[in-house]
Amino acid sequence: MRDLRNIYIDKPDLEKRGKEFNEKYKKERINKAAYDIIRAKGNSNSWGEFKSDFTLYTENRCPVCEERINQYDDIEHYRPKKDYWWLAYDFYNYYNCCDLCNTTYKKNFFPLFDESKKVDFATKDKISDEQPLLFNPLKDDPLELFYLEFFMSSSDGSFPSVRYIPNINLDRTSYKYAKALKTIELFNLNNENPKNDPARRSTLNDLSIAIKHFRKIVRSWRSEPDLVKRAEQGKIIKEFRDKSGLFLCQFVIKGLYIDLTKSI
Ligand SMILES: [Zn+2]
């Protein structure tokens, strides 16, 4: 999981270009006939110009499943362009995504907590009443929605792995709990889909290896008496944390994390 809530603040140039993009396609965002014309022309890849910006920001990881991606992977429309046509050319509806999340699993699904609160497609009214059940890296805090649970995937315990679960502090009847659960299920994040998915399995393995490594360097940092060496190790931890994303590292050291980042 990656947190993209600050991407427009951290990359003001990206937002500037996004606003220009929205201005350029203003007609296509308002008028269905104009949208149909541009779609018929096959001008559907204009949003591709933002791919590399997003991918750089997430350290070449899919913000939903952590699979490795590059600038040739997809730009995801959070609200699918098939139904929400006026958001097809809306910069604020985009983030980077792996092909598996976008094409294999999400497709055009866009489930809501209360389907009776779906936007009126004719008037586009009340879209803010919708409570989407899919994690939106641009708006949602992954730490608020999800937890990583460790388990042993081999009998001798030599191969610990991880699985996503909804944040254990969430009320099971809440919208956020339902959102976390549906995201895990729809994107097959734990590879529990009846169709075993090698790519998903590989991403989960990578995740568990990264967590094991992070845990090891944190333990070493904690027990290092030499202050100079400790400072050097602190730098490595910080670097790893920045590259791996806060979400992943949070689960390695839980409460200690706050103290640790203050100390580095
Ligand atoms: Zn993905």
Image (cartoon, rainbow, N blue to C red):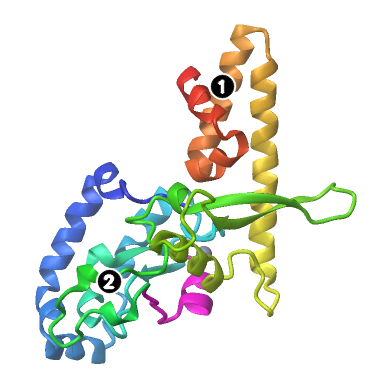
Q: Nearer the viewer, residue 197 or 189?
A: 189
User: Judging from the image, what secondary structure is the residue with disc 1 in?
Assistant: helix
Q: Cα distance, mark 2 to mark 1? A: 43 Å
Q: Position of residue 149 (x, y in %)?
A: 64, 51
| Label 2 CB sits under 8 Å from any ligand 1 atom | no
Q: Position of residue 197 (x, y in %)?
A: 67, 73
Q: Is residue 258 left or right of residue 78?
A: right
Q: Residue at x 37, y 72 (%)?
A: 113
Residues drawn in magenta: 98-112
Q: Residue at x 46, y 76 (%)?
A: 106
As for residue 105 lying within the magenta part, the answer is yes
Q: Nearer the viewer, residue 177 or 162?
A: 177
> Pointer 1: what residue?
234
The correct choice, above or below, for 215 with respect to 148 in the image is above
**Classed neighbour count for the residue bearing mark 2: other residues with Cα under 10 Å, few (<14), some (14–19), many (≥20):** some
> Pointer 2: what residue?
130
